[in-house]
Amino acid sequence: MSKQLFLLLTALISLSGYAATISGTITQKSGTVLPYSSILVKGTAQGVSANNQGKYQLQLAPGEYTLVCQYIGYQTIEKKLTAGKADQTIDFQLEPQQYDLKEVLVKSGGEDPAYAIIRKAIEKRETHLKQLRSFQCEVYLKGQLQTRDYPDRLLGKKVDFQDGDTSKRKMIFLSESVAKFSVQEGGKQKVEVISSRVSGRSNSFGFSDPSIISLYENMIDMGDELNPRGFISPIADNALNFYRYKFEGSFFENGKEISRIRIIPKRNYEPVFSGHITIVEDEWRIQSADLLLLKKQQMQLLDTVKLQQLFVPLQQNWVIKNQVIYLSGGILGFNFFGSFVQVYDKFDLNPVFAKKYFDHTIFKFLDSANKKPKAYWDSIRPVPLLVEEVKDYHKKDSLETLRQDPHYQDSLDRKRNKFQPLGLIVGGQSFSFTRSKQYFSYKSFLSTLGYNTVEGGEMSFLATYSKRWEGRRALVLRPELRYGFANTHFNPSLSGNYVFGKKYVKNFSFAGGSKVFQFNNDNPISESLNTLTTLLRKSNYMKIYEAAFFRLGYSTGLGNGINASVGFQFQDRKPLNNLADMVSWKQFPEKAFTPNYPVGLDTGNIVPHQSSALTIGITWRPGANYIELPDAKFSVGSKYPVISASITKGIKGLFGSDVDYTRWRLNISDDLNLKLAGLLNYNIGIGGFLENKKTFTPDYQHYMGNQTILSTNYRTGFQAMTYYGYSNTASFQATGHVEYHLNGLLSNKIPGFKKLNCFFVVGANGLYVNNNTNYYEFLFGIENILKILRVDFVQGFEHGGGRPGGFRISLPLDDL
């Protein structure tokens, strides 16, 4: 038996040696390289792509072949060869495509011939969109990002890539993947990642999404970060309203006439492309695309994006062979560029899928996908690595090996973990213990320093400790030591959570100690913002009480878009009163501090009491799709809204509890992508008290009001509502939050203003309570100001005739 096995292995080794390597360089006649050119074996979809230095490499078994070399805008060249055991070098020199214009006659004032071609392509758009209803193929993907320049410091901290290289030009991301891409009639898709590799991160999964950007769609989704509206296809049903076209000639390839059309935006600041497409005569399908997006086409985040696609005929159909995206941009002093290459191969146009192959797992990483050796990648890679990519893999993989050495980790930790006394006052400090996967950090005292009318000056020591194990398992502890200088109250507490679960994430949370709570436990105003309003405006909006407490919670995913949670909390509540001598930096003789309880809701402060409450909740997103890793599964949303429900029971007598009530809540929310028309999001909720035998102010149904110039959460908050003016124990109440983000619609028509790339947003929030105590407000805003700011004007309408309102500013500052 051992002899037979030896002979079999010998035969396999011998057979593998018969595959010859065909390599070469693809250039223009002048010698300029043609990056990401396509090399095909004629009559098949088998082939490879050159890298951005024009070099290619192809494995062929012995036999007779014809290689077809293509590059957008250049004449296709074919070369015959006989593959044997020996490797061969075959270079290609391509000449610019010669376009025939001799039969085109354009009369003065007449229409360019391109328009007739485009109209026919538009007529056939939907046919081609649905033509390949089912197929399966293999895709090689490579993505890389590099810096041209970056700042020495960012937000006061030194920028250090910890790679020993001080040059500004460096590879910050490099990834390769091989995936099986399956499509079935009805829009069902599934991606199975066979292998994935990330430079310097052996346990990571990299760029692995082989999405085909289809110009046969009316709106092209290039990512919400670039433009949430998407970009209008050059052959969209309404494309003639947004583009001008110019016929630049035709050429013949494989017996088919192909026309080259220049795409020209009619107006700046519209979500459109510029560049060229080639269209096959009589079939009116796209043969190639070379398109460009610029900032003036309402693109955000990036400066330029270039899309190149090449399609090839296969079995009476056309399939995509290459897709390359080039990008460049700059933010916060970082100037970067990159490319994302996809090479499609091994097409099966008549696949037979197993029953239930298409489920709600749309993206699956196979076991050991990120464990393939270097030899594997060298044998399957259809795009040769660049010199800098080879160096990056070698350097970062070597650094990763070094960083896994226990002695190196200990020495690095010793360097990082030197105690910095100044960190206690400003900046805070972090400590890492890499070998044991433990981390500890604390905030500076200055960052927690605040003032309120109850404690006077108050300061906290806030720290975080975390410990990680293999897989998802992690423990996080957050001790807090709070001290009020004027009332001399000391409140220590500890909170934490333990995350675990293989298929779906599970989370066990706990907390206990003594703590200062806002009457609305959801904290409608931050302590730092309350400090400013108290000292500068004599407005002590934050209302607080003190409680010894403990809290337990558990949440888990159940699959099919369902998540469940249960939580229990006990509080021994005690009232807190304002200080006799309260401080304000500015004097307002006509204005006095309000008592430390919700005035208008209560006539006096709460009395000491105990509360035990159990909350059960469930969240469901029908049709939820998942990404599945070898040891975890994550929801990535669906086309349906999120539905959530909860019920809270105040349990009388448990641990001496005085409360006795039942409160319920039902919510539905979603984001509706209206494509060119913008984005509509909504959050509608109903709820109330099924019974209310005994409640105290913290048990009421509260709302996220706002009486400051900084906005509150747009999805759940009211931008001009008083903080406790509408809290209730009604048997029924309903809330609604609706926002319409125009995302460039209308604003791109205003001269001058459109150059700012700012967008309009309108919204409405409303509250209905069954005792006819209602509130509603409307807002108009401008967002994407300097890419980060949003400013709204809000007008509220109160029950009783009040008209609160004013401007609200949304700042990306978590601490406020």
Image (cartoon, rainbow, N blue to C red):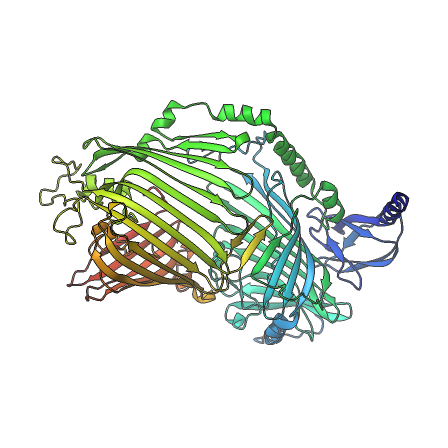
In the image, 340: left or right of 660?
right
| Residue 715 in sight | yes
Q: Is residue 812 above or below residue 493?
A: below
Q: Give how far across and how far down residue 123 sits, in percent.
A: 60, 76
Q: Residue at x 63, y 63 (%)?
A: 357
Q: Nearer the viewer, residue 704 or 298?
A: 704
Q: Give how far across and how far down residue 386 sits, in percent.
A: 69, 43
Q: Residue at x 48, y 35 (%)?
A: 467
| Residue 741 in sight | no
Q: Which residue is the extreme one toward the left?
A: 590
In the image, 739: left or right of 305?
left
In the image, 741: left or right of 376?
left
- In the picture, residue 642 is in which quadrant? bottom left
Q: Give how far across and how far down residue 360 sits, in percent.
A: 56, 61
Q: Nearer the viewer, residue 381 or 664?
A: 664
- In the picture, residue 620 is in which quadrant? bottom left
Q: Give how far across and how far down residue 127 sits, in percent.
A: 62, 74
In the picture, the quarter occupied by the C terminus is top left
Q: Nearer the viewer, residue 543 or 23?
A: 543
In the image, 658: left or right of 616?
left
Q: Is residue 418 above or below residue 146?
A: above
Tally of numbered discs: 0
Q: Is residue 9 above or below residue 460?
A: below
